[in-house]
Image: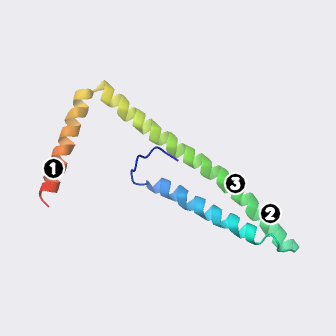
Amino acid sequence: MSDSHNSPLTSQEKLVMDIRAVIADAEDILKATADQTGEKIANLRTRVQDRLLGARIRLDAAEAAIVDKTKAAARAADDYVHDSPWQAVGIGVGVGFLLGLLLGRR
């Protein structure tokens, strides 16, 4: 999905994973009921398949948007560091100092 390098999942990434699981479960139900007959079942199966296809398409688009936003944020951070290296170093030192203070008090 993304190059997270062991970072925790964002709520959007978790949502995408949950929706993928629901879609997979619904597809399993469709496969398990494939031998069921009757007009009502056939209509229901067709509607569910259509909705699953639509959900997959929207989910793929949402996932692509998440990846694009993540890449854009990484590019912006990279550009900032390249454009203002001393400010970036100062921010890093400040954040490190604050984290040291907070962790030192424990």
Q: What residue type is labelled 1?
A: Gly
Q: Earlier in the sequence, mark 3 or mark 1?
A: 3
Check whether the beta carbons of the residues at disc 2 and disc 1 lie within 8 A of each other: no
Q: Distance between the residues labelled 3 and 2?
A: 12 Å
Vertical side of 49 occupied by 72: above or below = above
Q: Is residue 100 left or right of residue 35?
A: left
Residue 102 screen position, x and y as percent? 16, 54
Residue type (three-letter) at the residue carrying disc 3: Gly
Which of the marked residues, 2 or 1, is nearer the chain's N terminus? 2
Kindly identify the residue that appears in the image at 31 percent across and 25 percent down: 83
Measuring from the top left, give residue 61's x and y in whole percent. 60, 46
Residue at image point 75% right, 61% down = 49
Cβ atoms at labels 3 and 2 below 8 Å apart: no
Q: Which of marks 3 and 2 is nearer the N terminus?
A: 2
Q: Is mark 2 on a helix, strand or loop?
A: helix
Tag 1: Cα neighbours inside 10 Å, few (<14), some, or many (≥20)? few
Tell me the CA gap for discs 3 and 1. Answer: 49 Å
Q: Mark 1 points at which residue?
A: 100
Look at the picture and state if 55 lies above or below 72. Answer: below
**Image quarter for residue 106?**
bottom left
Q: Name the residue under label 3.
A: 54
Residue 42 spot, x, y in % from top left: 84, 69
State left or right for residue 26 relative to residue 62.
right
Q: Is mark 3 on a helix, strand or loop?
A: helix
- Residue 46 circle label: 2
Closest to the observer, 83 or 5: 5
At x 18%, y 41%, the residue is 94
Q: Is residue 70 left or right of residue 44?
A: left
